[in-house]
Image: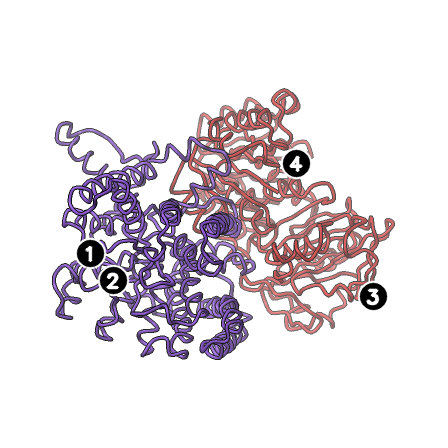
Amino acid sequence: MNYGIVLRVLGSILKLEAVLMMPSLCIASYTDQADKIPFLITIILTAALGFFLSFINRKCDRHIGIKEGLVIVSLCWVLASIFGALPLYLSKSTPTYIDAFFEIVSGFTTTGATIIPNVEVLPMGILFWRSFTHWIGGMGILVFTLILLPALGIGGYQIYKFETTGPVAGKIAPKMKDTAKILYGLYLGITILQVILLRVGGMTLFESLVYTFGTVGTGGFATKNASVGAYNSTYIHLVIATFMMLSGVSFSLYYSLVRRKFKEFFGDEELKLYFFILAGAVVAIGINLFFTSYNSLGLAFRDSYFQVSSIMTTTGYTTADFDKWPTFSKAILLLLMVIGGCAGSTAGGMKVIRILVTLKMIKREVLKIFHPRAMSPVRVNTKPLQNETVAGIFSFTSLYLMIFALSTIIVSLQGIDFESAISSVAATLSNIGPGFGFVGPTTTFSSFSPVLKLYLSFLMLIGRLELFTVFALLAPKNWRKEV
Amino acid sequence: MKVMVIGAGKLGYKLAESMVLEDIDVTVIDINQKKLDYVNEHLDVLTVMANGLDIGILKELGISSYDMLVATTDSDETNTLICSLTKKLGCKTTIARIRNPEYMQQLDFIKHEMGIDYIINPDLATAQAIERYLLKNYNFYSGEFASGKVEMIDFNIEDMKEFVGKKLMDLDYFKGMLVTAISRNGEIIIPNGSTELLPNDTIFVIGKTTDINRLNDRITEKDIIKKDIERVMILGGSNIGYYLAQKLVKANISVTLVEKDKERCQELTQTLNDVLIIHGDGTDVHLLDEEGISSMDAFVGVTGFDEENLLMALVAKQSGVPRAVAKISRQNYSRIIDRLGIDAALNPIYITASEILKVIRGGKIVSVSLLLGGDAEVTEIIVGKDSPIVGKSLEELNLPNGIIVGVVVHDEEVIIPNGKTRIYADDRVIVFCLSENLPTLKMFFGSQKGGFLNELWNRTKGIR
């Protein structure tokens, strides 16, 4: 393995992280709260190590193969979290370092699960940094770095492949760097649009930034304990719900929209299934709510729409305490947690495309019962999928479910009820945030034991990097020097 | 610049690889997903699985926004059709690979009628390269620059005691010439005066044609045999064999061509008049002996199999043939060929890629040759007025190690430059460049738009 380039890229990531903390430092200095010095210390530390790593490896071989890509991606996320957690700990926003680490992993992986019971007392710099990690982590820390790192060439693709969500990493421009530029350009565009719309709705600039980061990154950190529910404005609810929904769509697909390829956009099968599931869930939950607890059909649908968008895109904002909703609604929400958004979006979960392929495989098997000799490849958007891709999707699905089951057992050691155990695993593995019961919308993860907090952080990371990236890294074969 | 390559075979891959190094946006199209996966894993290009003849797909990819299209599929007819279609769809320049000799007679007609800008025939180009090598009377493979005024040769010093163990600055052989590179065990070394030569180094020397000729004579004096080529044996009646035989016969050389396939032999007899065509297995040593291999002046292996060409060239060398040439299409062998002891290994893919690169780089580039398995190249450039190097001395330019200005041709005068040499507009400059330094080369010699923002966004400065 080429350790030189791995360390060098990691160095660049740290330098980048130091730069990305600057806005938070500015806010901290401006408001002159307790987080000013912690940010300063962290930036100096991070930048120093970053420069050191880049400097000692400045003459390394530039080649990035599959293995290097794998190691870079996994280590980058861990390293960024380790340093990103420092300001939280140093400013005493969290009682222990593990809490801070959990909080920032939750940020970078766009989970939005918090261990801070009262976020309203946090310094503004910290609040901003927490949410900003959503924005960076949503599209990928490394994809961002790709724009800045010169001449990584094909190495860029190896990194992109492991960091982006979904079973197949497609480029949209010949050069990896241009692909990254386009993706971030679209991302930035949507972000700016939402900030403007939220400002119009009467939020302060600071709040609209924080909520926008949480929305387009599909994260879920808020400035208020009651999340979006603190704003009693249907307009704000609808804006955030809609942007959550939009952020659950593949960003490459938006590129076809920009290029006026409307057919490509609206004809996309994954997108159709995504909206179908979303609409179905909104209607089902809306009606269920109306007949059980809500008096107004409008309000029932507003909350249903917001919550379904929030959970399906794995954001985790709340406007109502859905833990108190009827079991029918909660069951649907749990299912949405597992499904997640579209591939190539900032959302987590198993991704709609995998569900789509699985459904098509089932359909094919049924067909094969009647026509045993039928040749029918699984097609998505009229193109037949490679057998390897289909097999990959299947092993992903099985691994996901296995980890899900195993983790539920591990988490249940905390001594919580079954519903809470299942939903806390779903909430972290699918990068959502809040679950039910013990980890419901009105409570936090703070009462988990430190070991379980670390375990849940691990779940968030493998969830964000889609299991195999991290698992391949854990295989000892990777670390042997030869090959 | 945007280029579309259709067909991800050996040539398509090599082209894409060379273009990526030049910062060109490349899209590769093929119908074989496995090949595309390979390309995707190794090159920073966009791959699309589609039939290159599918107009819908081409339009969807925005073919009219492409500056160039190169069709390198297996079929000449498909290539022609693709080029013709895309030209009509608005692609600025189209290049087709056409191999069938029967089309060669009507190339101009095809080009004109179908609207194709360039037609490249790898087999013909290779045959020409072999012919040049054989007729040149050199012991080494060479390249010509500045319309023949400058030449570059590479040769293996084997264990000649005049060279081995000596430092470059102590050798009077290279007076007025420049040793641009040494290939040692498949690795490239950029030498300086104190670099010591080791046995089996291959050295690349560039200089005035007259000087190179003198060097050639001085070295070949040491060799036992030195005579003109009169008898040549060609192994393999492929297109290359056909073109080569045709050319050699014109130069009054007696040619023996061995081909395995009977029908192909019959075809060849129809068109090749004064060539002795032998139907038989070219790997059969007895057959070759009967046909008098030991009395040949040169042996050329151009069958479809690299291994066969290579091994039979070695067999010929052992039977006492002074010059053995083999056609090697696979890139992967290039690292070991230097050590095998055959005189020249020609790769049609490089030859073709060099030709196409010349077209891509446009007007000011006169010639390009890929060397050392494509790890380096020699480019002849006419310096433009707005190039950032005009009026500067080489010292001031501070070129990276991998870029060597071999020769400057100023007002018809050939100058082997030193640090004080200045470069002016309209000079011809022959540059040796490692492929990793290509973007830098482009920066120095091109007339790119500058500006801080442009630099920041594209990070051209960062590539050193």
Question: Mark 1 and mark 2 in contact (Cβ < 8 Å)?
Answer: yes
Q: Amino acid at mark 1?
A: Asp
Which mark is drawn over residue B253? Answer: 4
The correct choice, above or below, for A117 with respect to B49 in the image is below
Question: Mark 2 and mark 3 in contact (Cβ < 8 Å)?
Answer: no
Badge 1 and badge 3 in a common chain:
no
Q: Which residue is mark 3?
A: B420
- In terms of image quadrants, where is residue A6? bottom left
Q: Amino acid at mark 2?
A: Thr
CA–CA distance between discs 3 and 2?
77 Å
- In terms of image quadrants, where is residue B133? top right
Q: Which residue is mark 1?
A: A323
Judged left or right of residue B367, residue B321 is: left
One can see residue A43 in this view: yes
Chain drawn in purple: A
The correct choice, above or below, for B222 with respect to A374 in the image is below
The percent coordinates of residue B283 (x first, y second) are 44, 42
- In terms of image quadrants, where is residue B200? bottom right
Q: Which residue is mark 2?
A: A442
Q: Amino acid at mark 4?
A: Ile
